[in-house]
Image (cartoon, helix red, strand yellow):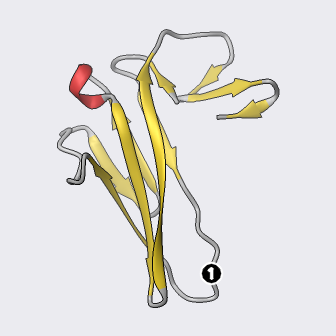
Amino acid sequence: MICEKQTLCLLGCHATSDYPVTYSWTKKGELPDNNDAKTINNTLAVRASDAKDYGVYVCNAINRFGSTAYNITLSEGHKSSTAVSGIEEKDGERC
Protein backbone atom coordinates (compact mmCIF):
# COMPACT_ATOMS: atom_id res chain seq x y z
CA MET A 1 0.00 0.00 0.00
CA ILE A 2 1.32 3.43 -0.90
CA CYS A 3 0.89 6.24 1.61
CA GLU A 4 2.01 9.86 1.35
CA LYS A 5 3.72 11.38 4.40
CA GLN A 6 1.33 12.98 6.91
CA THR A 7 -1.64 11.22 5.26
CA LEU A 8 -3.91 8.96 7.29
CA CYS A 9 -3.67 5.44 5.87
CA LEU A 10 -5.98 2.60 6.85
CA LEU A 11 -4.62 -0.95 6.85
CA GLY A 12 -7.30 -3.58 7.23
CA CYS A 13 -7.70 -7.33 7.26
CA HIS A 14 -10.61 -9.68 7.81
CA ALA A 15 -10.80 -13.28 8.97
CA THR A 16 -13.95 -15.36 8.59
CA SER A 17 -14.89 -17.68 11.44
CA ASP A 18 -17.92 -19.06 13.24
CA TYR A 19 -16.15 -18.13 16.48
CA PRO A 20 -15.12 -14.68 17.71
CA VAL A 21 -11.88 -13.37 16.23
CA THR A 22 -9.54 -10.90 17.89
CA TYR A 23 -7.03 -8.86 15.92
CA SER A 24 -3.66 -7.41 16.75
CA TRP A 25 -1.07 -5.57 14.68
CA THR A 26 2.71 -5.82 14.80
CA LYS A 27 5.67 -4.34 12.95
CA LYS A 28 9.02 -6.15 13.22
CA GLY A 29 7.46 -8.42 15.85
CA GLU A 30 6.43 -5.56 18.13
CA LEU A 31 3.42 -3.31 18.53
CA PRO A 32 3.66 -0.36 16.13
CA ASP A 33 5.62 2.40 17.91
CA ASN A 34 4.20 5.28 15.89
CA ASN A 35 2.30 7.62 18.22
CA ASP A 36 -0.04 8.23 15.30
CA ALA A 37 -0.91 4.50 14.88
CA LYS A 38 -4.26 3.45 16.35
CA THR A 39 -5.97 0.07 16.23
CA ILE A 40 -9.73 -0.09 15.73
CA ASN A 41 -10.95 -3.73 15.60
CA ASN A 42 -9.36 -5.20 12.46
CA THR A 43 -8.06 -1.87 11.10
CA LEU A 44 -4.82 -0.05 11.81
CA ALA A 45 -4.85 3.70 11.17
CA VAL A 46 -1.34 5.04 10.51
CA ARG A 47 -0.24 8.61 9.92
CA ALA A 48 3.25 8.08 8.50
CA SER A 49 5.43 11.01 9.52
CA ASP A 50 8.91 9.68 8.67
CA ALA A 51 10.78 6.68 7.21
CA LYS A 52 10.49 4.52 10.36
CA ASP A 53 6.69 4.46 9.94
CA TYR A 54 6.95 2.64 6.60
CA GLY A 55 7.56 -1.08 6.26
CA VAL A 56 5.77 -4.39 6.79
CA TYR A 57 2.84 -4.44 9.20
CA VAL A 58 1.35 -7.79 10.22
CA CYS A 59 -2.32 -8.32 11.03
CA ASN A 60 -2.76 -11.25 13.42
CA ALA A 61 -6.24 -12.82 13.60
CA ILE A 62 -6.76 -15.19 16.50
CA ASN A 63 -9.61 -17.35 17.80
CA ARG A 64 -9.77 -20.34 20.10
CA PHE A 65 -8.78 -22.74 17.31
CA GLY A 66 -5.68 -20.97 16.07
CA SER A 67 -4.34 -17.94 14.33
CA THR A 68 -3.36 -16.56 10.95
CA ALA A 69 -1.28 -13.58 9.86
CA TYR A 70 -1.43 -11.24 6.87
CA ASN A 71 1.43 -8.93 5.84
CA ILE A 72 0.79 -5.45 4.45
CA THR A 73 3.72 -3.33 3.24
CA LEU A 74 3.29 0.40 3.71
CA SER A 75 5.44 2.33 1.23
CA GLU A 76 6.04 6.05 0.86
CA GLY A 77 4.44 7.58 -2.18
CA HIS A 78 2.94 10.71 -3.60
CA LYS A 79 -0.68 11.65 -4.13
CA SER A 80 -2.24 10.40 -7.32
CA SER A 81 -5.65 11.02 -8.78
CA THR A 82 -6.71 7.46 -7.87
CA ALA A 83 -5.84 7.61 -4.17
CA VAL A 84 -8.74 8.06 -1.75
CA SER A 85 -8.00 8.20 1.99
CA GLY A 86 -4.98 5.97 1.63
CA ILE A 87 -6.72 3.42 -0.62
CA GLU A 88 -5.17 3.17 -4.05
CA GLU A 89 -6.91 1.72 -7.08
CA LYS A 90 -4.89 -0.41 -9.45
CA ASP A 91 -6.42 -2.02 -12.53
CA GLY A 92 -9.89 -1.41 -11.15
CA GLU A 93 -9.14 -3.11 -7.81
CA ARG A 94 -8.64 -1.41 -4.47
CA CYS A 95 -5.31 -2.10 -2.84
Residue drawn at the location 33% of the way across and 28% of the way down: 54
Residue 26 falls left or right of residue 7: left
Q: Position of residue 16 (x, y in %)?
A: 64, 74
Q: Quadrant of the C terminus?
A: top right
Task: Note whether 74 is above or below 35 in the view shown.
Answer: above
Residue drawn at the location 35% of the way across and 55% of the way down: 39
Task: Note whether 51 is above or below 18 in the view shown.
Answer: above
Judging by the rendered image, the residue that carries numbered circle 1 is: 17
Residue drawn at the location 35% of the way across and 17% of the way down: 5
Q: Position of residue 48 (x, y in %)?
A: 31, 27
Q: Nearer the viewer, residue 31 or 7?
A: 31
Residue 62 falls left or right of residue 55: right
Task: Note whether 29 is above or below 66 in the view shown.
Answer: above
Residue 29 falls left or right of residue 9: left
Q: Position of residue 52 (x, y in %)?
A: 22, 27
Q: Secondary structure at mark 1?
A: loop
Residue 76 falls left or right of residue 1: left
Q: Nearer the viewer, residue 76 or 41?
A: 76
Q: Amino acid at mark 1?
A: Ser
Q: Nearer the viewer, residue 84 or 95?
A: 95
Number of marks drawn: 1
Residue drawn at the location 37% of the way across and 44% of the way down: 57
Task: Note whether 46 is above or below 86 in the view shown.
Answer: below
* CA neighbours of label 1 inside 10 A, class few (<14), some (14 to 19), many (20+): few
